[in-house]
Amino acid sequence: MIQVNQLSKKYNGTTVLNINNLEIPKGQSFGLVGNNGAGKTTFFSLLLDLIQPSTGHITSNNIQVNENENWKSFTGSFLDESFLIGYLTPEEYFYFIGDLRHQNKADIDALLAEHEEFFNGEILNNKKYLRDLSKGNQKKVGIIATLIGNPEVVILDEPFANLDPTTVSRLKKIIKDLAENPNITVLVSSHDLQHTVEVCDRIVALNKGEIVKDIQTSRETLQELESFFAV
Amino acid sequence: MIKKFIYLEWKAFTRSASFGANLAMKILLGFLMIYFSLIFIGAGVGAFYILKKMNLEPLVTINKFLLYYFLFDLVIRLLMQSIPVLNIKPLLVLPFKKPTIVHFSLGKTALSFFNWVHALFFVPFSIVLVLEGYDVIGIVMWLVAIFSLIYINNFLNIILSNIDKLFVVFIGLAIGLGGAQYYKLFDITIFTTPFFQGLYAQKGLFLIPILVLIGLYQFTFKYFKNNLFLDAGLSKKEDVAKTENLVWLNQFGTLGTFLKNDIKLIRRNKRSKTTIVMSVVFLFYGLIFFGNTHQPEAMHIFAGIFVSGGFLFVFGQFVPSWDSSYYQLMMTQNIPYRGYITSKWWLIVIATFISTIIASFYLLYGWEVYLTIVVGAIYNIGVNSHLVLLGGAFTKTPIDLSNAGGAFGDKKAFNASAMLLSLPKIFLPLLLYWLGLHFADKTVALALVAGAGVLGFIFKEKVFSLIEKRYKLEKYSTISAYKQKN
């Protein structure tokens, strides 16, 4: 599904990301772990054509993302709060994204109803604009919005950060459900090794922009990763 | 301590997104600044001799209008002067004394453009007065008093800026008083002129404004010091949200989706709401030119452009910066650039259209005047709408929509520079109109301008392709510039 070729990103001569070859097959749930500055967000930004690669390219479903924009129709993503429109209510935001993804109101309502538990009654019909929601609640909105329009690729940057324990476990369930669907490729980044191990089939660890580990998740994965990151 | 603050301010200034703009822009802005400064100084020097020539006693005449001067100053401040803020939150927990923080934040406002610009007029005017034999001590006292009043306005603006729509009251007051005076119902200046004159003539009267200023500063200082808490003066005001679906726009497809969003954008953010106010103000711009024989005729088209173009100039100028806070989202959604630009274009066209209809009250000046406005509207739709959208591709100043509250919140980050940059958009029609007038007559002149508009309209698709290409080319640098504030 996603193919990375000779990809690198340099800022003023400093290489922040350098991935020679990486292939993510369709249907995989892919976890990206690493310390701050390891290049996780940079990789996602490149994948979403928000920044330009210094060398190489990424193809998503055989579409080179920095040449052709057609990947947008099957990709749902949430990197940070700048993906939210502050002056809309959550409902309006969902409908707006729905309109852009050619979903009608009923589709959106169905999706929202499905995730009512995840919202925990704090999102819908709350008479608040997105800008006035707490960070965690904003994140909930952003995450669910990525699911609008049956995307084939879902990209979530640090989805577990800022969430309360209950929501984290509900989010894990959502991601696991997505992972079970053979048509959906999920990409998740996190600092939290345990969460990532729980929801992902495959984990790639980045360090200073390089891939330092690439493992299929098994019972020993967590231990292996923990010992790797332990100093 | 203060040194640290100044260091922070300097960094904030030199590292801001707009400062990094290209050199040509800075030079152009520099020239415009000098140009306007010269005009002000010229007015200051010239005022004396012009008034003298009109057989008016200069100082008394100026004093007569000072009341209105200060009223309008206050209105303009309420609308435009952003309260310069130190980024206060991170400082609260650091070992700074609260009074220091407040003193510095207030002191910073004293250096604002809105204060020193007055000096450009009053200082030369005073110098001329002294040279013409007015009492030196009297003039100095008068000048000191005037500046106290200007700074009183400065601090009034800070205190009052938390109250929405207050400027309407002051505009109303100014119009009411002015109207009453014009129709000789009630002349407020009979009461105020002696006071302003007294600042010059009466020894010691100038102490009153100074004392008021000191009192006001104390009050402002106390007010902010007591409110320097995250849940008080620095808190964010939360609005009660109402979900609006604006279903009737659905029939326009993707265009409707964007229009819906833009309407909400304008209605729900303070920053964008002012564009509507400004558009209304622009509507009355023509009153200065039409029926005024002092103005050269070529200037009529100038007014014609502005009357219907208010929204275009103040809103269109900042496309796509309005969407800066969520630009990354827009770039990852399934959005064709063209759809996005087209929706903004329609918004501008609709606003121009509505302005033109409202402007029909200019028919009172005769149908020729209104025709000029209609021609101006055609030009706005055909040419200027494209120009502002194209310019937008280069606008890389993020607009902070959500920063709606808080005592020190930078709410009205009004970008005067961008407004000045819109001036070239009116020189071309002015030239066309002038050429028409010069070599033929008014009909030809109007036809020329309208023709340019129609021509622009015909090539709309071509121009849009060009704009689209520009936006794509600028995509990455725009994203990174917009990230600065997020």
Image: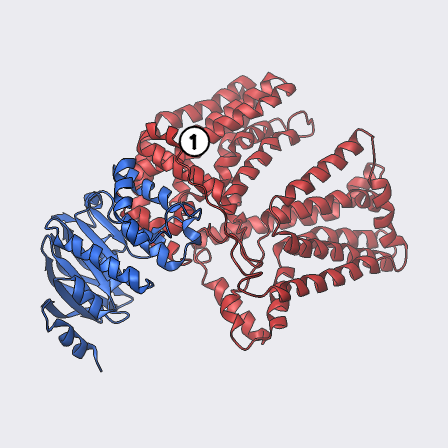
Chain colours: A blue, B red
Give me the residue at 24% from left, 69% from top. A192
Q: Amino acid at mark 1?
A: Val
Location of residue B131 in the rendering, given as x and y in whole percent from the top left corner: 82, 54
As helix, strand or loop, the secondary structure at mark 1 comes to helix
Query: Can you give x and y, in whole percent of width and height, for residue B436 in the image?
Result: 52, 23
Left or right of B477 in this view: A215: left
Instruction: Give the x, y percent position of residue B151.
Output: 71, 57
Quarter of the view holding residue A212: bottom left
Label 1 marks a residue whose chain is: B
> Residue A31, how many percent across, how many down?
18, 63
Residue B99 visible, this angle: yes
Q: Nearer the viewer, residue B253 or B481?
A: B253
- In this picture, is A49 found above or below B391? below
B242 relative position to A82: left or right: right
Q: Would you say residue B396 is visible in this rendering?
A: no
Most extreme residue toward the right is B202
Q: Residue at x 57, y 38 (%)?
A: B277
Task: Give the labeled residue for mark 1.
Answer: B383
Residue situated in front as seen by the camera: B103 or A179:
A179
Residue at 85% across, 58% down: B136
